[in-house]
Amino acid sequence: MELPLSAGRVAFFGGSFDPPHLGHLAIARAALDLLHLDEVLFVPVGAQPLKPGGASAGFEDRVAMTRLAVAGNPGFAVSLADAPKPSGQPNYTLETLLSLRARLPRDGKLFFLMGADSFRGLRSWHRAAEVPFAAALIVASRPGQHLDDLREALPAGLTIRPAPDAHTRRDPGDSDRSQVESFEVSDAAGRTAPFYLLPDLHLEISASAIRNQVSAAAEQPGADLELLPPAVAAYIREHHLYRESQV
């Protein structure tokens, strides 16, 4: 059991991290800086419901690589909140978010950081319409992404509009959000939740392409894996991950 969270403004950043790459770090750093977060939690998932085949690397290896990726980055931490369940059941993001929120201080605030591709698939998630109200969404946008794009990706029953006071509102600790677009999500029951769009931060980095690159370079110890933190690339080589038979 992990200890209660002590930071006041925390972003959940979940995913397979199979492997964690420089794109993940860039998105997390932008969110940390632009929204003045206290901490970004990298949370490797045990079993994704929408990926029944599972990850290429085992959970322990993905956690180890993620720890190496975030090492030396102030404000980044790794959480086991989405570790595999003893029952073997899938990990549902909503349940993890609610558990994390319960561990925050009374005045804490939980955010949910995701890339544009993850947000585009949100409609198919378990109890998707409840996710924005469990944690304020932060989405790393594609260049030129518009409000209509966001509306198309939202779960059924939700609407989004520019925040009524987007130019003046500041949450506690937010001294400058001039580069962040602020929106408001609402449902039929009248609930509202903030939604933040990070500017032009979508990076065209495919984890599957990285795994294929690693596989091709398996017999070339000096090959440059420029999309990975050096410590992660070294771990992959040392543990013989993502060889051709595993990708």
Image (spheres, grey):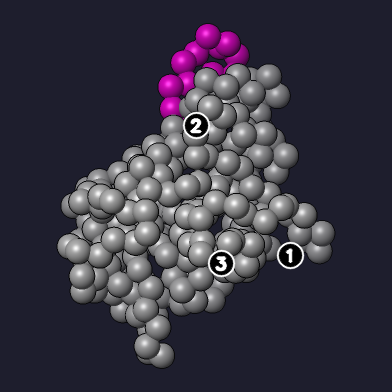
Residue type beneath disc 1: Gln
Q: Residues within 10 Å of mark 3 (few under 14, many from 20)?
A: few
Left-right relation of 162 to 223: left
Give the label on residue 89, or none.
1
Q: Which percent across, then down, holds residue 167?
A: 17, 62
Give the label on residue 73, or none.
2
Residues in magenta, as a range: 210-227
The residue most toward the right is 86
- Give the foreground label among 3 and 2: 3
Q: Which percent across, then down, holds residue 180?
A: 26, 53
Give the label on residue 57, or none.
none
| 190 over 230 or under it: above or below | below
- Give the foreground label among 2 and 1: 2
* Magenta stretch holds residue 195: no
Q: Which residue is mark 3?
A: 106
Q: Depth check: give the residue in front, 146 or 49.
A: 146
What distance separates the C-alpha of mark 3 from that of mark 2? Answer: 26 Å
